[in-house]
Image (cartoon, rainbow, N blue to C red):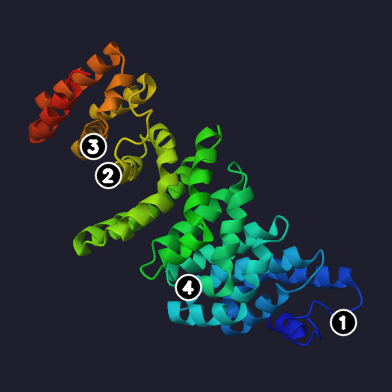
Amino acid sequence: MEQLCDIFKMVPGIQSGDTGLGNPALVEDTLSTLFSLSEICLPHVSCYQAVPVVGHLCLCQGDYRGVAVQLCVRTTEHAVHVLEPEQLCTLYTQHVLPVIQELLLETPPLPTLALRIVLPLLSVIPELPLEEHGIVTALVELMKDVDPEEGICLLMLETLGCFMTAPTVDFSWLYTLGLHEQLSLLVLKLGVSPNTGEGTVLAAIRCLSALLNYVMSVVKKALQTQTKSAGEEILRSSQCVVNTCGVLLVWYHYTSAPSALLSITQLYGGQYKDFLTPYNVDILVESLKDKDDSRVKTTLKILKRIVSTDPDLLKSMIASTREQLNKAILAVKSTSPTLVPLSEEVSKLLQKTV
């Protein structure tokens, strides 16, 4: 492995894509050999030697570039287990991150491979400087055309989830990229896709929740400082998240979906006009039967918020649906004593004459 690394160190013009070997097949064969040996040899090679080499190899142009990036993926999987976060950040910021944006905008499978490099790094270095290398901008571009049923969608959402939950993330900058709009559109695509896996759903909810937490924080700060315009501006900009309510109801059985839906209703009240259709009420009623009181409480808070902010929503309920919901809330009163006051509040709102 060390000898092969030395070979590539001496290849002239590797950074410019001109290998100087005169035979692309020879380059591809050598890279394939290096990749085959790497699984066994990497534990015996210094990451300080391997990472700069594979970073330069990712700059290669031609059919063998995919093998070079695969080698970088394998090196990264090894490096995250043997180097300290500070060491990883220094090595990859200098030698690998500069090429990731280009890989993300290439043809498949290079974007997928690029994400397989970035995601392990983010898992141990949440503050990895992705934005300095145009990687987040490329991810937003990738979101526009990503197929929700492809594996890259999960990798992309997991990567964004790690990035968006880092304490240093600048959401105001993400808004200028249009991330909030693209994320909302992607959630809608995932909601109608019949083959959306659980991992993809959870990753999407994590991203959406991070976005909503940011909006909530801006609104709360605006209320505390009495800067009404700032709160109104972020609410207008984030209006697109209201469209995801229907999808969150479909995903309501997932642990994190109710809290995300509650955040939207706290911000926008009953602006989603289909909350109380028979199909959606069935979902809410099932949730009220949950043995987890925290989920039941969240559902009651959602119902209280949407009905109290838009009483006209009650007009959309047919009599049988209203009766079904009232019975479910009555059952909560008998099984969850701590939820009796909240249940009674919701019952009174639902019983108003419309």
Q: Name the residue under label 4.
A: 128
**In which quadrant of the rendered image does the N terminus lie?**
bottom right
Residue 17 location, x and y as percent?
A: 80, 76
- Location of residue 192 with respect to 256 vertically, above or below: above
- x, y percent for residue 135: 57, 67
Q: Which amino acid does label 4 sit on?
A: Leu
Q: Looking at the image, is 152 positioned above or below residue 294?
A: below
Gap between marks 3 and 2 measured at Cα: 7 Å
Give the mark nearest the N terminus, 1 or 2.
1
Disc number placed over residue 299 in the picture, else none? none
Q: Considering only order in the chain, which callout, 2 or 3, is on the residue closer to the N terminus?
A: 2
Between the C-alphas of marks 1 and 4, the distance is 34 Å
SS of the residue under disc 4: loop
Q: Which one is earlier in the sequence, the residue at label 4 or at label 3?
A: 4
Instruction: Name the residue that disc number 2 marks.
Output: 266
Label 1–label 3 contact, CB within 8 A: no
Q: Which residue is drawn at 36% across and 51% down?
A: 235
Give the residue pinned by disc 1. 20
Q: How many marks?
A: 4
Q: Mark 3 points at which residue?
A: 305
Q: What element carries label 2?
A: helix
Of the pair 60 and 324, the residue shown nearer to us: 324
Separation of residues labelled 1 and 2 (CA atoms): 62 Å
Amino acid of disc 3? Arg
Say which quarter of the image contains residue 269: top left
Q: How many other residues sit within 10 Å of disc 3, few (<14), some (14-19) or many (≥20)?
A: some
Q: Residues within 10 Å of mark 4 (few under 14, many from 20)?
A: many
Tell which circle, 1 or 4, labels the residue nearer the N-terminal end: 1
Residues under labels 4 and 3: Cα distance?
39 Å
Q: Which mark is in front, 2 or 4?
A: 2
Give the CA distance from mark 1 to mark 3: 68 Å
